[in-house]
Image (cartoon, rainbow, N blue to C red):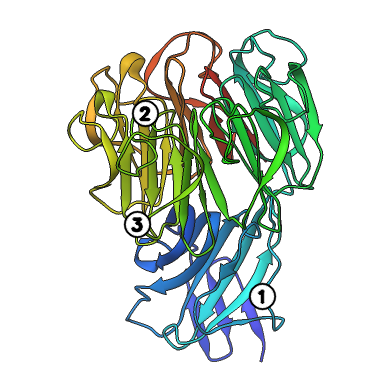
Amino acid sequence: MTIKLSATRLDLGTARLDNAAVKSSSQSVNALGSVSGSVTINLALGSVVTATIAGATTFSVTNIPSSTKYCSFTLILTNGGRYAVTWPAGTIWQNGSAPTLTAVGGTDVLTFFTTDNGAIWRGSFAMPNVAGGSQLFVWGLNNDGNLGLGDTANRSSPVQLAGTWGSVSSGDGMKLALRTDGSLFAWGESSFGTPGHGDVIRRSSPVQVPGTWTTLVVGNTHSSALKSDGSLWLWGSNQYGQLGFGDTYRRSSPVQLAGTWVSMGLGQHHTFALKSDGALFVWGRDFSGQLGLGDSVNRSSPVQLSGTWSAVSLGPSVSSALKSNGSLFMWGQNGGGGLGLGDTVLRSSPVQLAGTWVSVSLGTSSHGALKTGGQLFVWGANDNGRLGLGDTIGRSSPVQLAGTWGSVSQGGGNGHGAGVKTEATLWTWGHGNNGQLGLGNTAHRSSPVQIAGAWGAVSVGKNDHSAALRS
């Protein structure tokens, strides 16, 4: 058969297509944010799904279009190999086995296709480790060398830190960051041994902490990191038993906490950690009921909080935890309505916040959380516009911030926030006196303002400094 093609006609033997035109098309992005536990991919919300793995995760699929038995979707995972991932029931992989995903840094792209309304999914590894590591940029207050640039000069615009990085966590006056090979570096304020270098010497440039690691979280004055075997290590200040070792002695180098763990959260003086079965353990200071145990008694060893949980986030004296069904619980200090419960009453036990959520970030007294579909809600204190709502009025209940978001980070200090939208744009808002908004000046912003470039993740520090990754 002869095929003829012209600008206006396509001949296929006895068939002919006249005046063919290519029209633009697009696919909706369903941004799940940080996920763990049981996660449902709702195809009614989009056929391109993005997620960051924050704990052991089991995926399922719902709302397969009923008009046809044929359907496909794309899943874009960040840090997919950090924890165990269980795929939708009936998945058959192209090469006969599930792929090995990137544990730290980078993004893996997978595709799934069904010919029988989801009874069997055929999976393929479309693009492994797309980013292959990221550039790390830092800005803001630098009085402790917490920007890692070898000096103590503030920066009001993002400045690149040498190297290729996979993740970063910002504390009070210091930072921890992982490279894609699992090496851990720390720098900044070190009065309590928080960087983990075995001393209390301040570093203004990154210095490696021995070991190979997969996950890190830094609090105000203590730090933590996980290894691939699930071992949890902690170090830094321990005045209230926040390291969990049964005493109040400071550690300036990583020390292992007994047990096998999948994720953790650090506040100012308290710590939470999750096991793979969803058991949540808490310890440290409890003056505002932030341990959730119904009292205000400090604990220097882990104590289990009842329930089964999938993720945690801690502020200085406030706590939150998610269940696998998307229910979010808050407790602890409630000044300025920081618990989002419509009042300012302290809670020493978990209280559910209405709605279904996928991730949460707690600052000092202002907080943010994401719902399925990238809806971002903020609440709490709002001095200097730290909620990003265009005013300085505090909210004691969640209020939506316009846009479609993939992640959010709320800080402490004078109060600023940052978020990355689903199209990889980075936005900042709130207090800017030390250049922590990265906008080239020290002005406050009560509404989100974009920082140029395409970004993957952002971490706002507890003391007016910020960091973000860019591929």
Q: Amino acid at mark 1?
A: Ala
Residue that numbered label 2 is attached to: 287
Q: Secondary structure at mark 1?
A: loop
Which mark sits nearer the N-terminus, 2 or 3?
2
Q: Residue at x 49, y 61 (%)?
A: 48
Q: Is 219 left, or right, of 335 in this rendering?
A: right
Quarter holding residue 448? top left
Q: Are marks 2 and 1 in contact (CB under 8 Å)?
A: no
Relative to 10, say whether 324 is above or below. Answer: above
Give percent across and percent down for residue 123.
60, 76
What number is the disc on residue 113? Answer: none
Q: CA distance from mark 2 to mark 1?
A: 47 Å
Relative to 281, say whether 283 is above or below. Answer: above
Relative to 443, say whether 50 is above or below. Answer: below
Residue that numbered label 1 is attached to: 98
Q: Amino acid at mark 2?
A: Phe
Q: Residue at x 23, y 19 (%)?
A: 393
Which mark sits nearer the N-terminus, 2 or 1?
1
Total marks placed: 3
Q: Amino acid at mark 3?
A: Gly
Give percent across and percent down for residue 166.
69, 43
Q: Is 322 left, or right, of 255 in this rendering?
A: left
Q: Are marks 2 and 3 in contact (CB under 8 Å)?
A: no
Which image quarter holds the N terminus?
bottom right
Q: Residue at x 48, y 41 (%)?
A: 283
Q: Residues within 10 Å of mark 3 (few under 14, many from 20)?
A: many
Q: Is 407 left, or right, of 179 in this rendering?
A: left
**Residue 374 visible in this rendered orientation of the protein:** no
What number is the disc on residue 326? Answer: 3
Give percent across and percent down for residue 421.
46, 40
Q: Secondary structure at mark 2?
A: loop
Q: Secondary structure at mark 3?
A: loop
